[in-house]
Image (cartoon, rainbow, N blue to C red):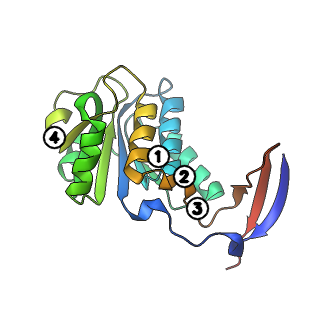
């Protein structure tokens, strides 16, 4: 892995796809030890695919701190936090709430509905353990990313990519200490010198 130095001026100042929608991901039922790796992956996908924050419920461990450190190194304003009461969080959400499930309406229809309703602030709910039945009625939409058993991480990535229409992959993360410099061979990482 080679490293090079660059300045903050090297970054494209465009805000990226995340300005279209303000997306928060809520992961229900995070379990100690068993879900730490998957919850971290949920956070990585949330951040890389355009969400602005991740809320974990269930057990409180160091996953949130790990995701905060990642955001500090790789940039962006991604937030991660833990809440005790997910029901209150969903009930008091000021925006559109979406539950990703294999039992919901077709993904294309769900995305079309979000765009038609001009939803801007979106809460995306995904499960860890078995999802409580009441979530289906607490949210505004239940959207299926396919009707077969699959990973919540995959469902989240596909949903966000369809929502942002691929633009999220070209988002610039400001205030980064590191960034990858695309290369056909090898790994090139640049240390970013922020001049403030």
Q: Which residue is mark 2?
A: 169
Q: Pick out the residue farthest to the bottom.
A: 196
Q: Pick out the residue farthest to the top.
A: 149
Q: Which residue is mark 1?
A: 46
Distance CA(mark 3)–CA(mark 2): 11 Å
Q: Secondary structure at mark 4?
A: helix
Q: Which residue is mark 3?
A: 173
- Please state the horizontal and vertical placement of residue 178, each as a whole percent of the image: 71, 57
- Is residue 89 in sight in this rendering? no
Q: Secondary structure at mark 2?
A: helix
Distance CA(mark 1)–CA(mark 4): 22 Å
Crowd class of label 2 (few under 14; some 14 to 19; many from 20; radius 10 Å): some
Do callouts 1 and 4 mark residues in contact (Cβ within 8 Å)? no
Distance CA(mark 3)–CA(mark 1): 14 Å
Q: Pick out the residue farthest to the left.
A: 137
Distance CA(mark 2)–CA(mark 1): 12 Å
Crowd class of label 4 (few under 14; some 14 to 19; many from 20; radius 10 Å): some
The count of marks equals 4
- Please state the horizontal and vertical placement of residue 129, each as a whole percent of the image: 35, 24
| Residue pictured at 48% horizontal, 50% vertical | 166
- Please state the horizontal and vertical placement of residue 55, each as a whole percent of the image: 38, 46
Q: Earlier in the sequence, mark 1 or mark 4?
A: 1
Q: Earlier in the sequence, mark 3 or mark 1?
A: 1
Q: Pick out the residue farthest to the right.
A: 2
Distance CA(mark 3)–CA(mark 4): 33 Å
| Residue pictured at 69% horizontal, 75% vertical | 9
Instruction: Specify whether 152 is left or right of 77.
Output: left
Q: Quadrant of the C terminus?
A: bottom right
Tell me the number on the disc at residue 138: 4
Instruction: Specify whether 14 is left or right of 55.
Output: right
Distance CA(mark 2)–CA(mark 4): 31 Å
């Amino acid at each position: 892995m080679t490293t090079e130095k660059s300045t903050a001026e090297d970054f494209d100042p465009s805000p990226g796809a995340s300005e279209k929608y303000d997306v928060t991901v809520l992961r229900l039922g995070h379990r100690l030890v068993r879900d730490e790796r998957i919850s971290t992956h949920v956070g990585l996908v949330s951040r890389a695919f355009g969400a602005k924050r991740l809320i974990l419920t269930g057990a409180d461990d160091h996953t949130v701190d790990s995701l905060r450190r990642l955001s500090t190194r790789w940039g962006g304003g991604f937030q991660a936090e833990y809440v005790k009461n997910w029901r209150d969080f969903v009930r008091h959400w000021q925006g559109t709430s979406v539950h990703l499930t294999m039992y919901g309406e077709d993904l294309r229809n769900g995305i079309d509905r979000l765009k038609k309703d001009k939803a801007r602030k979106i809460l995306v709910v995904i499960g860890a353990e078995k999802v409580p039945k009441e979530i289906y009625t607490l949210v505004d939409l239940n959207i299926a990313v396919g009707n077969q058993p699959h990973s919540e991480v995959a469902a989240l990535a596909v949903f966000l990519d369809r929502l942002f229409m691929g633009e999220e992959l070209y988002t610039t993360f400001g205030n980064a200490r590191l960034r990858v410099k695309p290369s056909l061979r090898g790994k090139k990482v640049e240390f970013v010198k922020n001049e403030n």
